[in-house]
Amino acid sequence: MSQTPAADIEPATRPKISFAGVNKFYGNNRARVATTLALDDFSLDIAPEEIVSIVGPTGCGKSTALNLLAGFEQPSSGGLVSVDGQAVAGPGPNRGVVFQQPSLFPWLTVLSNVVLGIKCRGVALDEYEPRALRLLEEVGLKGFERHYPYQLSGGMQQRVQIARALINEPDILLMDEPFGALDYQTRLLMQKLLLRLWAHFKPTILFITHDVGEAIFISDRVIAMTKRPGRVKCVLHVNAPKPRGYEFIGSPEFTRLEHDLVLAVQGEVEGDEVAAH
Ligand SMILES: Nc1ncnc2c1ncn2[C@@H]1O[C@H](COP(=O)(O)OP(=O)(O)OP(=O)(O)O)[C@@H](O)[C@H]1O
Ligand SMILES: [Mg+2]
């Protein structure tokens, strides 16, 4: 597998994000701690402005892949994770991250949570504050700027996390089961909100979920992973135009994709032969 960043590829055809033959194991043989091979030769290219979801059995390496791209982890041996043809060396403001559990500071207001990172980067108040207020309005939190996290519902806290991730105007948004803890109705609302924000900011999005319907509703492509060690098992293209409304859910294309994805994921959990019957 090539170790060379794709610097010689035309920008128009160059993937925004590239995982090329990535291996990741955890543990330490010298300390006699059992090693876990989380990703094995994981390869995936994502185009600029594309929305790609990853689904797969628990423990198959989805968060590991996202953490490598976020720069929280490094590949173990061989392989390369790159953005715009440059190897990822660590976290950066061009990649906003949203986690499953709201990770807001409880002693800071909504507004202070959103601006904390950008303030620390030395951006001027008169630049970041209007931007934060606009973003909070866009995610439906106008009027809640001075509230504290404990005064918000789970869905509202996730909206704050999204605003916080977007404040740096990142061109990549990394989302690890961001709506997993929300009720069904709120989750649908958040999926539509995400598509609206995408239409406005056009970030490239890597989205992890266990909900195959959610993956299909928001994505241009859905990647199903094998069980650990994780690799790409199959790729499904979702051709419905965006923005999408609820009429897409239950359409023949949606139903077909849902069926194929359930078989792909359950095939890893139960075995392909068993899942097909
Ligand atoms: N920091 C770590 N130290 C040791 N092992 C880890 C670490 N992070 C992940 N692992 C292991 O790597 C494998 C993949 O974990 P990962 O969190 O990427 O799975 P996942 O697909 O995100 O699962 P889930 O759907 O449950 O979130 C698992 O076996 C897990 O135990
Ligand atoms: Mg995970």
Image (cartoon, rainbow, N blue to C red):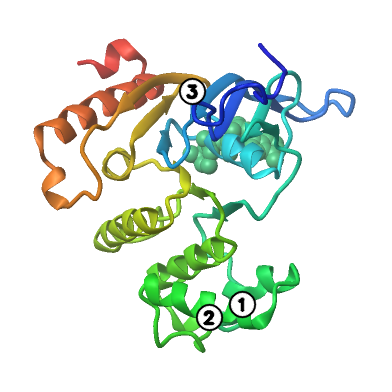
Residue identifier under label 2: 130
Residue type (three-letter) at the residue carrying disc 2 = Pro
Residue at 54%, 27% (x, y): give it: 14
Identify the image quadrant of the N terminus: top right
Mark earlier in primary sequence (1, 3): 1
Tag 1 near tag 2, CB within 8 Å? yes
Mark earlier in primary sequence (2, 3): 2
Q: Is mark 2 within 8 Å of ligand 2?
A: no
Residue at 68%, 13% (x, y): give it: 2
State the separation of the CA atoms marked 1 and 3: 46 Å
Secondary structure of the residue carrying tag 3 is loop
Residue type (three-letter) at the residue carrying disc 1 = Glu
Secondary structure of the residue carrying tag 2 is helix
Can residue 151 be seen here? The reply is: yes
Label drawn at residue 227: 3
Residue identifier under label 1: 127
Where's residue 47, x and y in %? 47, 33
